[in-house]
Image (cartoon, coloured by chain):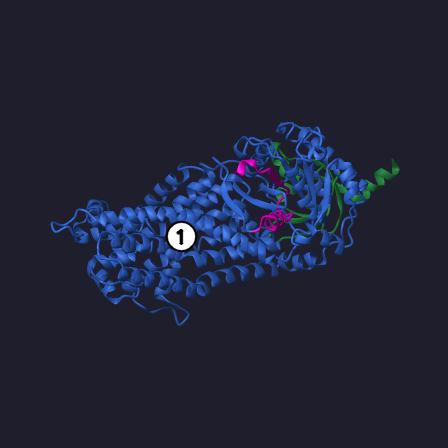
Amino acid sequence: MLAEVPLEEEVVLVRMDVAGEDVEPLLERGIVPGCRLCPVRHAPVGGPTVYSVDGCLVALRREIASCLCVRSALEAAGVLDSN
Amino acid sequence: MADSRPLVLLAGPPNSGKSTLFNSLTGLRQRVANYPGVTVERRSGVVRLASGRVELVDLPGVHGLSSRSLDQLVARRALLGEMEGGRRPDGLVILLDSTRLSSHLMVAESFLGLGIPTLVVLAMADELDRRDGAVEAAELSRELGVEVALVDARDPGTLGSVHSFFEALLTGGEEARACPAVAVADSHVAQSPARAPTRPLPVVDLFSARRDRARQLGRAAGYRAPRESVVTNRLDALALHRIWGPVVFLGVVALVFQTIFAWAMPLMDATEATIRISGRYLHGIMPDGWLRSLLIEGVWAGVGSVIVFLPQILILFFFIALMEDSGYMARAAVVADRLMHRVGLQGRSFLPLLSAYACAIPAIMSARAVEDERDRLATIFIAPFMTCSARLPVYALLIAAFVPAGPVLGPILGRQAAVLIGLYALGLVAAIGTAALLKRTLLRGRPLPFVMELPPYRMPSARSVATRLLDRAKVFLRRAGRIILAVTVVLWVLTQLPRTPDGGSPPIDESALGRMGQLIEPAIEPLGLDWRIGIGLVTSLAAREVIVGTLGTIYGVEAEDDTTLELRAALQRDMDLGSAVALLVFFAFALQCMSTVAVMRRETGGWRWPSLQFAYMLVLAYLGAWAAKSIL
């Protein structure tokens, strides 16, 4: 899950376990399966985490980041290479 | 005739520099109003060109055109010709930030394919270039099938292609530019948003397709994303730092507080003095009679009581504009999010609530930044509990009269200051409690996920800040001024009737207003308050601090400020400590401000919320005051 990814590690979004219309604000900001996300910094006092998505910075609360299933970008690239 | 001018809509995602482009194109020829029936602001302006004029409407900044938010709904309906009095737009300008083109092209996909002559403007061209990014406008134009211009919205010299687009609309040469209808078949406009709760979600596929198309467009247009912004990186390292982030945040909050309370005071005093002196001058040159009394004691004093807050409100909006335009506002919302989340709100609610310590009106107006409608309503609802500056003269008078000076914490904190802090805390506790109550009852529901885009830091432009201040001042004066004018005229009439046998105005206790005070006396008697305070409570509906002047008139003392010793002495004769505290608590809770009610009606689109809030706060104020009186 995205919430577990350490800072500076690039990942690829695989699946979004977000209910119904809640998914739209994410999609509209480019958080779409297949996109690359990189946690850039954690906000102070346990606040949201800032992610870099396609050159934009987007802050997400932990409960949403916990619903986004990701895999390492390197691993994803490896899968592509082997294909 | 405005209708004969071509209507052009300006669309794009938030924080893409839309307002800057709008201001550059229209200058000061702008109007701000709400779209009919909804609370979304409509900014329109006129662009003057060699062959005529074009009406430009700045649509709310949106990431898409589903009907998830009011902003999106309005943008969508305006594009489909269901707004603007049913007029279909003659042209569309889509503004995208060229430094964030990959994601902004996804947004553009929603706006294309409407069969409207379209120009895509890529803003921040200078920054893209500076950070070694690149894009071929001509290639992108070929791919999109519409014209594409690369501009720096702040530099009018780069806006030639936008003007040419408008000229073409005016001279009727636009047919060739009309982009084909439904170039993108899966646009939200062509198809209402899928909201199926089960997976796989079609809406996800729709956006995936849109992202693929955006990437393909970017590749075809030779888009090279800019290097990471060093400035944004460094500033974020500070603004979102574990320790320094909250320090910077509190520093900004302290600066805003210090400015609106300490630095705005000389300006407010000067405004007040100007109103008083000019009132006296007019009083001197006008013949004695009812007209003079109406104009000077009614209209002049009433409207003056609103204008006096203008410096403070403008300073507050100056800070809001600086924070929004620089990009810090989004960071502040992220830093405050955790705290606000605990009371059921979100980070974006923080600044409106902070503003409410100066005045609830700008707070309610700036709550538009809160995207989630339930959170926005909750923010608006609790804003008047924050201790606004109009309460201070009332607090100062009563505290000085009933709370003896003396230390509580040695030289650091005096007893009077402690009571004042207590009153601030009382308002805050009531606000938090009310927010929690609302979110469990009327505004219950799953909140939208907190997704906050952090725009790159940018130097705010003086022109953009000045334009915003001007239109905020207009909205404030128009909304607050009108209702205050009406309320003060009604109150004046009530002090003038019934006329005495010789045709003069009656003493205040025999006037209609005095009788109203006597009428409500039984209701406020349990609070230890008499008919004189009753009159004050009625007049303070115009603005809270008006009660000080009213009490001065009733007690026959000239109370031009709250330090008047005679007024304090008169109050000490008529009230005991319990009733004074009851009155303080009443003012801490009651919504004694018709301007706030008027602005709230505008921002919530009806009387439901303001009526509910007025009643809720009145009941809370009464019960709180009764409890205080019973205890003391």
Determine whether, in the image, residue B322 is placed left or right of residue B517. Answer: right
Instruction: Tell me if I can see residue B431 in this picture.
Output: no
Find the magenta span and give its range.
B1-27
Which three-letter amino acid code belongs to the residue tagged 1? Answer: Gly
Q: Chain of mark 1?
A: B
Tag 1 residue = B427
Q: Residue shown at 72%/33% (left/top)?
A: B176
Q: Which chain is green?
A: A
Q: Which of the image's four quarters has the C terminus of chain B?
A: bottom left
Front residue (pair B373, B407): B373
Q: Horizontal and vertical percent for residue B277?
A: 33, 64
Quarter of the figure with residue B304? bottom left
Identity of the residue furthest to the left in this view: B501
Q: Residue shown at 67%/58% (left/top)?
A: B237
Instruction: Tell me if I can see residue B589 in this picture.
Output: yes
* SS type, badge 1: helix
Q: Which chain is blue?
A: B
Identity of the residue furthest to the right in this view: A82
Q: Horizontal and vertical percent for residue B341?
A: 54, 46
